[in-house]
Image (cartoon, rainbow, N blue to C red):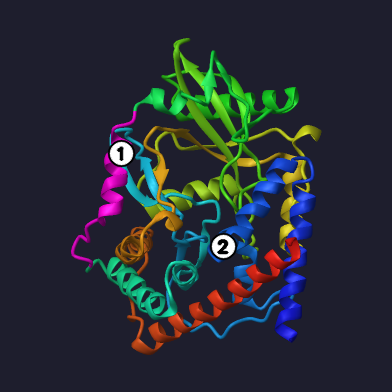
């Protein structure tokens, strides 16, 4: 019963923070509730601070006895099954399937990424424990092979190859259709209106980004709107921009605000620069049109933020004074990802170990040294810890659904 009461308090705090952070946007609040309530995996995706509280024993939840698997460096910070997808690389010519969401990137223990990926694997609804636990072990084996560069060039599974084939057939017009008309965003549940002040602040920040990113190809912003996407990022600063080059070539860009890592690690550099540096290190490249920008602070840009602890509150106060620090990327018709709930059991069984390989490769690219290999006992303990983490998220998700019911 003590655990139940702690989880109830945690869920109540999540609900309160969401209500405060999203009070200006009822649609975003409704979308956020729907995503968290949809499944335990959706709850995990949207509540990264809860996950790290479990690891570190903060707040209302107890810490886990996580094995001291060695290794530290750049980590994704939110390496779950649905944070992999397609993007164009910085050359603009190659389409790649890899990690593709780095909002939470930071420097930390590699085991944090591994535990989050294993936990998300165990939360796939279609998999009973008799299949989920062996799959988690296979994901860990894939990670270790990718990190040690002994994965023998693991090939993408069929579901990834099919996703690539569909994406490569898309044209720019396919991206603009249904989103843009006569130089303006079509406002809908995907794109919400900005105030005049917010719109101008977004234009100014984008122009600074464009001048630094590609001074030889001037992009003029012509419209901007709030972009409704993601799960944990709902309610953070996320703006889509329509820009023109030479007065006629229209393209879409996104500016996405960066915040303190969910584990509340004090950031020694500006959040946008941290995310940009970590992204480049883990991928060994940059997404197409990738850069950073800081939006000027102003009353129209201020929104309540989730307060996790003293470090987080200090960061939120700094953000109010300086405005959101953002990463910017160009949206392309090839941007896409797999939704795990839409995959068959066979596809999940094929996909998950490959994602483990990709995570291992990312850590290796960012400088991870193999050092002392993780022993069988450490590997066993990591899977056991992920089982505990998955159980805690299933229970918290149940309390969340019960509370909202």
Instruction: Report whether residue 53 is seen.
Output: yes
* Front one among 220 and 27: 27
Distance of label 2 from label 1 (alpha carbons) = 27 Å
Assign the N terminus to one quadrant of the image: bottom right
* Front one among 176 and 323: 176
Name of the residue lying farthest toward the left:
152
- Name the side, left or right, on which 389 lies relative to 160: right
Is 165 colored magenta in this rendering?
yes
Q: Residue at x 34, y 81 (%)?
A: 372
Give the x, y percent position of residue 377: 39, 89
User: Which picture quadrant has residue 238?
Assistant: top right
The image shows a total of numbered marks equal to 2
* Front one among 187 and 208: 187
- Name the side, left or right, on which 64 lies relative to 132: right
**Stretch in magenta:** 151-170
What is the number of the mark on residue 39? 2
Please tell me whether residue 267 is drawn above or below residue 375 in the rendered image: above
Q: Secondary structure at mark 1?
A: helix
Q: Residue at x 48, y 10 (%)?
A: 247
Q: Which residue bears the numbered disc 1?
A: 166
Assign the C terminus to one quadrant of the image: bottom right
Q: Residue at x 32, y 34 (%)?
A: 91
What is the number of the mark on residue 31? none
Q: Earlier in the sequence, mark 2 or mark 1?
A: 2
Q: Secondary structure at mark 2?
A: loop
């Amino acid at each position: 019963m003590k655990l139940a009461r702690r989880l109830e308090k945690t869920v109540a705090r999540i609900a309160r923070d969401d209500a405060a952070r999203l009070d200006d946007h009822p649609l975003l609040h409704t979308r956020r509730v729907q995503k968290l309530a949809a499944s335990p995996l959706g709850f995990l995706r949207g509540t990264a601070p809860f996950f790290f509280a479990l690891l570190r024993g903060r707040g209302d939840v107890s810490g886990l006895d996580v094995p001291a698997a060695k290794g530290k460096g750049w980590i994704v910070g939110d390496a779950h099954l649905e944070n992999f997808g397609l993007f164009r690389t910085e050359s603009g010519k190659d389409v790649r399937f890899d990690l593709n969401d780095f909002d939470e990137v930071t420097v930390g223990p590699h085991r944090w990424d591994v535990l989050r990926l294993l936990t998300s694997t165990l939360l796939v609804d279609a998999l009973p424990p008799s299949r989920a636990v062996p799959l988690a072990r296979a994901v860990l084996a894939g990670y270790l092979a990718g990190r040690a560069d002994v994965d023998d060039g693991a090939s993408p599974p069929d579901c990834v190859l099919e996703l690539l084939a569909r994406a490569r057939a898309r044209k720019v017009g396919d991206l603009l259709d249904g989103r843009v008309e006569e130089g303006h965003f079509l406002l809908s549940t995907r794109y919400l209106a900005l105030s005049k002040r917010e719109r101008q602040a977004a234009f100014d920040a984008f122009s600074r980004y464009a001048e630094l990113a590609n001074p030889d190809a001037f992009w003029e912003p012509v419209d901007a709107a709030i972009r409704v996407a993601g799960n944990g990022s709902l309610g953070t600063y996320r703006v889509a921009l329509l820009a023109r080059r030479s007065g006629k070539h229209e393209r879409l860009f996104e500016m996405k605000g960066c915040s303190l890592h969910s584990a509340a690690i004090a950031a020694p550099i500006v959040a946008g620069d941290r995310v940009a540096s970590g992204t480049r290190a883990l991928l060994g490249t940059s997404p197409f049109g990738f850069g950073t920008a800081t939006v000027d602070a102003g009353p129209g840009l201020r929104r309540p933020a989730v307060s996790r602890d003293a470090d987080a509150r200090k960061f939120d106060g700094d953000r109010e004074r300086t405005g959101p620090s953002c990463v910017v990327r160009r949206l392309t018709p090839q941007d896409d990802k797999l939704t795990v709930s839409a995959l068959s059991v066979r596809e999940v069984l094929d996909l998950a170990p490959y994602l483990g390989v990709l995570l291992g490769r990312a850590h290796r690219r960012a400088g991870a040294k193999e050092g002392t290999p993780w022993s069988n006992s450490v590997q066993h303990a990591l899977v056991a810890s992920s089982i505990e983490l998955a159980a805690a998220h299933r229970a918290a998700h149940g309390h969340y659904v019960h509370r909202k019911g």
